[in-house]
């Protein structure tokens, strides 16, 4: 992947920001479309959303996802009914891995938890699941959809490497991390949907990389509060920016140029992913609804001139459920 330069991906968008007004959904959509799934759910409505045969472990996964990864929760609700339960399990598995890093004070403890999940995945493919709700649901998903073990292990391996808190030396290292985690999740989601298509895989690869880059940007204020910076060193050095600049919440032009370059790379991956849309099966589109949240963040950071510490970037988008639903109805990603 060629390195991005200011203006290479977005051209004049930085100097001319489009209006923020959102069009109302088409009259036909308002008149004919069924209601959105309930977002404030009770146990009974959760069971209905999860599909027939919902169990305690299924409800555990759904609730974990709702609390810890709300955007993935919303996207999973819009998958076909027969795929939701497996998608909840897969995303809950990712949440379990992602929260290891922040929940342990010592690396050896984190490594032990990662080893637990490595052993668990091997056991799942031997039909010997442990009595852990996420593992039980993941086992059912593997059995029903014949999920590829390699992708699951790759996510664990990459999360394990990330326990070291190493700074990304360049944008390619960040993209590799995103490919091995976020893209792997999308490959598995495509398997849940029964999709085996090269174009869909290419789109998933680029969307996963965009997801990883945007996640790194969004987490920068949080990481800064813990005296850590994970933005690629090569882009920081290109603009003469140090980690201390981010820790001090410096809002100078060179800091914003760093953010612009990184955001441009995410935008470029989204553009590449959408270049395949004519060849990607329509059945695969629900797997890529994450692009709605990614594009929303990229537009917001553009509006504040790439000030990564602007308070509006930390505000929840209350229109996201509607935006996701409209995108799903329009069969786009």
Image (cartoon, rainbow, N blue to C red):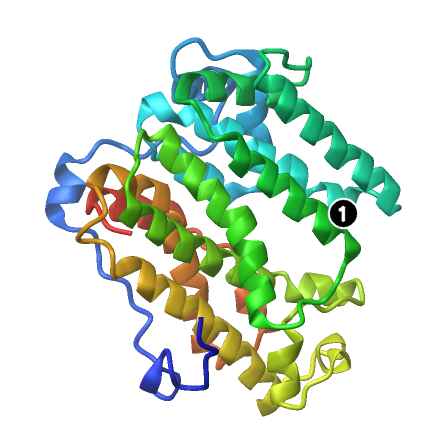
- Name the quadrant containing residue 57: top right
Q: Secondary structure at mark 1?
A: helix
Residue 269, above or below 15: above
Q: Position of residue 200 (x, y in %)?
A: 30, 46
Judged from this view, the residue extending furthest toward the left is 28
Q: Position of residue 110 (x, y in %)?
A: 80, 41
- Residue shown at 53%/57% (left/top)? 212
261 and 202: which is toward the camera: 202
Q: Position of residue 26 (x, y in %)?
A: 15, 51
- Name the quadrant containing residue 196: top left
Residue 3, above or below 120: below
Is residue 315 something that shows in the picture? no
- Residue shown at 39%/84% (left/top)? 14
Is residue 124 something that shows in the picture? yes
- Residue shown at 50%/79% (left/top)? 261
Q: Which residue is mark 1?
A: 102
Q: Position of residue 236 (x, y in %)?
A: 64, 82
The answer to whether residue 287 is left or right of residue 112 is: left
The answer to whether residue 285 is left or right of residue 309 is: left
- Residue shown at 43%/22% (left/top)? 146
Residue 159, above or below 175: above
């Amino acid at each position: 992947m060629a390195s991005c330069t200011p203006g290479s991906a977005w051209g004049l968008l930085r100097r001319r920001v489009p209006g923020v007004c959102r069009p109302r959904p088409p009259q036909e959509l308002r008149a004919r479309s069924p209601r959105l799934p309930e977002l404030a759910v009770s146990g009974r409505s959760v069971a209905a959303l999860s599909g027939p045969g919902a169990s305690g472990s299924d409800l555990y996964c759904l609730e974990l996802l709702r609390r810890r990864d709300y955007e993935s929760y919303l996207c999973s609700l819009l998958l076909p009914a027969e795929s939701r339960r497996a998608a909840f399990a897969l995303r809950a598995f990712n949440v379990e891995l992602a929260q290891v890093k922040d929940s342990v004070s010592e690396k050896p403890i984190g490594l032990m938890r990662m080893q637990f999940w490595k052993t668990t995945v091997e056991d799942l493919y031997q039909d010997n699941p442990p009595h852990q709700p996420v593992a039980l649901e993941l086992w059912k998903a593997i059995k029903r959809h014949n999920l590829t073990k390699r992708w699951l292990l790759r996510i664990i391996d990459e999360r394990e490497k990330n326990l070291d808190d190493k700074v990304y030396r360049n944008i390619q290292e960040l993209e590799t991390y995103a490919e091995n985690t976020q893209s792997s999740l999308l490959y598995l989601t495509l398997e849940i949907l029964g999709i085996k298509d090269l174009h869909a895989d290419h789109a998933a690869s680029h969307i996963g990389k965009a997801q990883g880059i945007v996640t790194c940007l969004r987490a920068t204020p949080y990481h800064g509060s813990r005296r850590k910076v994970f933005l690629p060193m090569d882009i920081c050095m290109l603009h003469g920016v140090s980690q201390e600049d981010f820790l001090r919440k410096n809002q100078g032009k060179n800091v914003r140029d760093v953010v612009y370059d990184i955001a441009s790379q995410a935008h470029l991956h989204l553009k590449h992913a959408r270049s395949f849309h004519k060849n990607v099966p329509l059945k695969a589109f629900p797997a890529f609804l994450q692009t709605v949240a990614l594009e929303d963040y990229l537009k917001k950071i553009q509006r504040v001139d790439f000030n990564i510490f602007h308070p509006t970037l930390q505000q929840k988008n209350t229109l996201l459920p509607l935006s996701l639903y409209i995108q799903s109805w329009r069969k786009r990603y």
